[in-house]
Amino acid sequence: MNATRWYVSLVLLLVTFLFIQRDFDDAYNRPIIGDAKAYYAYLPALFIYQDFTYSFVDEIEDTYYLKDGSLSKDFKVRQPNGTYVNKTFPGAALFYLPFFLVAMVLSWLTGLPVDGYSVLFQWSIVAAHLFYFLAALVILDKFMALRGIAAKNRIASLLMVTLTTNVFFYMVYDHSVVHIFGFFGCSLLLFLTQKGKEQNSWKYVGYVGIVMAVMLLTRPTNAMMLFFVPLVYPLRELVPDLKREFGWREFPFHLFAVAAIVLFLAPLLWKIQTGNWIVYSYGDEKLNLLQPNLMNFLFSYKKGWLLWSPALILMLVGSLLWFMRRSRVSGFLFTGVLFSITYVFSSWWIWTYGMGMGQRTMIDYYPVLVWGMAGFLALLSKKAKIGVFAMMAFLAVINMVQAFQIHRFILVGGETTKETYWEHFLQLKTDPPKTIIPPDWSFVEEFWEKERVLLNDENHFSKSIELNSLPENPAFEVQVNLGGQNRKSSAMIVMSDQNGGWYHAEYPANFIYKTPRAVSYLFIPDKKLKLPVKCYIWNGDTSDEVLVEELKVSVYSMSAK
């Protein structure tokens, strides 16, 4: 069975999802966003701007992101001496580097801006994730083949981790974090340890050292990956084997030197940025091992690891049974290390780790679960396997839908409650925005425009509602029924006073579907208005048709009753 063909097909499937769902012209969908702005900033700072104060970031924000700053990422942490340091470790930049350089050359050859953030640079981040994920699949497959696991079980286990866990979300929708690189590093660690066991050579210790140096430079907590090494190469064999093979002539000094150079990059960059060799770049963000949020980390509707990826429960149980079957030591080691990793990550100052799907920090360690699950499948009868595959197919559908929901903000990672989770279970449409009128506001009057209008290339404006008298401290609730064919529409709900001294717009594109439905927004002026005030719908930036069925403006007074 050609496993590589399966893995390439799987990556092509992910690429297909990527092209269908992502619009890279949309500032919200740019791959260099959120945490990726911090991880990535080392490269343009070094190769393009030669500026480790990152002063170029403000101009980049204005050029490629929203001018109101709502998509900006403040990754510079002020130090006691008044300097600033990039809060993230530079390891991710090493993974990005080859793709960044290719984007740099191609942008120069094609006349695109060589500013580090134009379209080819954005795509380079996606290419890096796809490449290292495919490489991880191939490496894991080779590792499991060396362990004697049949190809069909290897393929099934790798399909499971890709389609039934939050890996899918971070491969298709969110490339702003580094955990796919951790997944790759852990896979390579297992493979090199196995090769070292077979060839009984010190050079593989050197290779492992380089891999771990890169992993530590990416996320220092990746040091915990080493605890899984005895599952592959038991210490009772490793220590005497290394002693027996030790010899100064064979000792890989050059490999350890490479690992040391990689580790030295962090203090070197700290020195360049702050003048200090040692810096804690995360400021007030810390671990508190005395106050873990273990149950929330595992089961919370906000971002519980196992709640958002229930297939992992089966993978954990299957892995545990298989490791226990190998030996009790392996079973206890697997359980103890995984519990320790979970405990540490649940002790971070913000246990949800922001938005996103499930607990992304655990993705780095999934290769061990892939291995354990593949071994477990080898123990099952044909009928039992069919049952497992049917369950996984069902969970894959749920996983993909939930990934889509979080991408479209139907559910919000880190903020979802039990009630909202079940109210929106498998829902594919985003809830339209609704307004809540404060109880101390006084209703004054409402105005309607009920003419049905199709906005297109020939007709950009709806009929407007004109307000010629207003109460003191006015506020407006605007309700409109909108329909259309394309979420990319840039249709705006606009309110402005005479000559546009006060102008405010809302963009309902994410909530436009073929069947018209009501959306509502609050418009609260921040300055004195000059009458008349007008409200209308404008669809002038695109050719996508938008249907306006009716428009209503309700006027309120915010003055005390």
Image (cartoon, rainbow, N blue to C red):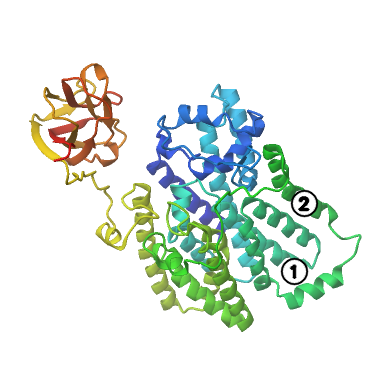
Position in image of residue 502 (x %, y %): 26, 23
Q: Which mark is residue 48?
A: none
Q: Does residue 378 appear in the picture of this structure?
A: no
> Gap in Å between the C-alphas at discs 1 and 2?
26 Å
Front residue of 209 and 467: 467
Nearer to us: label 1 or label 2: 2
Q: Residue at x 55, y 34 (%)?
A: 121
Position in image of residue 437 (x %, y %): 18, 44
Mark 1 / mark 2, whichever is N-terminal: 1
Q: Which residue is mark 1?
A: 198
Three-letter amino acid code at the position of disc 2: Ala
Q: Under tag 1, what secondary structure?
A: helix
Mark 2: few/some/many CA within 10 Å (<14, 14-19, 20+): some
Q: Quadrant of residue 203?
A: bottom right
Position in image of residue 103 (x %, y %): 58, 33
Position in image of residue 95 (x %, y %): 62, 45
Q: Quadrant of the C terminus?
A: top left
Front residue of 52 and 118: 52
Q: Which residue is mark 2?
A: 260
Q: Residue at x 49, y 65 (%)?
A: 156
Three-letter amino acid code at the position of disc 1: Glu
